[in-house]
Structure formats: structure tokens, C-alpha cells
Image (cartoon, rainbow, N blue to C red):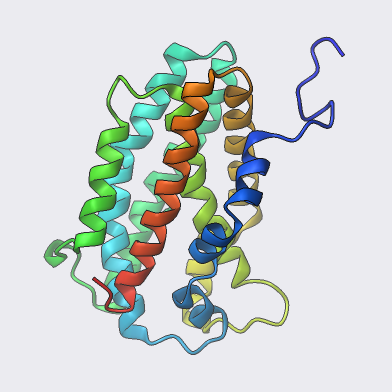
Amino acid sequence: MEGKTGEEMGKTLMTETWLRKHRLLYVGATRHPFILSIRDGNIDLSSFKTWLGQDYVFVRAFVPFAASVLSKACKGSDNSSNDVEVMLGGMAALNDEIAWFKKEASKWGVQLSDIVPQKANQNYCRFLESLMSPEVEYTVAITAFWAIEAVYQESFAHCLEDGTKPPPELQETCQRWGNEGFGQYCNALRKIADRQLEKASDDVITKAEVTFLRVLEHEVDFWNISHGGT
Ligand code: HMH
């Protein structure tokens, strides 16, 4: 038993418990009508362009948040070299992602400098900022980080499953977050979160669960932007 993780002992991990407990909300965030319309090939391309411009703004705000989680990993954890490497990989991917947004925007005629962040986007970015505070524990921050990435991974991977027919011009978008490498990255983040949660106090666990729920709610609101939602 000694040196074994909860997972190796067959114990139910915290993220597993939460994904079961909050299944409906998780499904709402990962099977949104916007995603289903990409999967089924009947997406309205103006919705896609709206999403593209808004998500670029979000990703720019996500960079300092990612940096703050990385910085907490450097300070906080006894396993910090693994955590830092996982997150550095994520930062490198973000660099690539920003270049991709620029290329994709020019392909679709979306002027990124003109994008006005919509209310739901502003709220989500403000939430990210609140998580950057030094008072927010590493466990809470890494839980949010995992959930944010996992929602996109699960959503876009769904568009690539057998029998789906995403429009050819959206294949690259689906691949970006739905590819296997991104899936492994999300699994690595989830493992870090579970390891942290296993040794956390009840108070921190509760804060992390609330943060997980807030992420899912923000993700649903964000998808709604593309449908002209408010
Ligand atoms: C809104 N959530 C949103 N945008 C993203 N690009 C991701 C998650 C994944 O990085």
C-alpha cells in the first residue's frame, strides 16, 4: 500500500465523484447545441465566427491565469517538477493556439482587433482574474484549470466521433481541442488536481468543488454567446 496513490488502490477520486454528482451540468457544458450543430454539420457559420472572435479574447485572458497556476505549482507542491512540466506544455500549446486564432480569423474575415467582449465573456474573464489572487490555493486553481481545458477537449472530441459530420472547414478547430494529445494533457491535469484534492482540507475541497461548478456554468454561458445569447 505504501506509496500507492488513491487511484492505484481503486479508490474513487474526487473529480470522478464530482463528474457523477454534477453530470447534468457537465453534459450541458460539453454537449451544448453549438457543439451539436458542429458535430451534425448544420452550424450557422456566423455563430462560428462570433465564437471565434470571442474565444480569442478569452484565450488572451487565459494566458495570465495559466501563468498564475504555473507560479503556484512552482511554490506549492511536493511534486512540483512534474506539475510545472505539464503546465509548461500547456503554455507552449497556448502560444500555438494564439497564432492559430489569428490565422483562422483572417481565413474567416474576422477582425480580431475589433472584437468587443460580450457580457458572458467579460464575466468569465473576471472570474479567471479572481482565481489569480495569491489567496486562491493551488488546489483550487488547478481544479479550475483542468475543468476549463477538459470542457473543450470533451466537446470537440465529440465532434470527431464515428458517424459525425463536422463541416470540412471546421475540422481543424475540432482537431485542435479534440486530438488525442490534448486529451492526454487534460488527463495529466486531472491527475494533478486529484492528487492535490486527496491531501486537501475539507474547506479547500469545498472551495474547489464550487469553483468546478462555476467553470461549468461559465462554459455554458460562453457557448450561449454564439447563439446570440446574452
Ligand atoms: C471558453 N473555455 C473557453 N475557451 C477555451 N479556449 C477553452 C475553454 C480551452 O482552452
Give the residue displayed 27% in from the left and 63% down from the top. Answer: 54
Look at the image and tell me in which quarter the N terminus lies.
top right
Most foreground residue, 21 or 71: 21
Most foreground residue, 22 or 116: 22
Q: Quick check: can you spot residue 142?
A: no
Quadrant hosting ligand 1: bottom left
Look at the image and tell me in which quarter the C terminus lies.
bottom left
Find residue 64 and report its image quarter.
top left
Q: Number of numbered discs present? A: 0
Q: Quick check: can you spot residue 192?
A: yes
Q: Is residue 188 left or right of residue 163?
A: left
Give the residue displayed 33% in from the left and 80% down from the top. Answer: 47
Give the residue displayed 52% in from the left and 84% down from the top. Answer: 167
Residue 222, compared with residue 83, is above or below; it is below
Q: Is residue 72 left or right of residue 159?
A: left
Give the x, y percent position of residue 81. 56, 17
Residue 224, compared with residue 99, is above or below; it is below
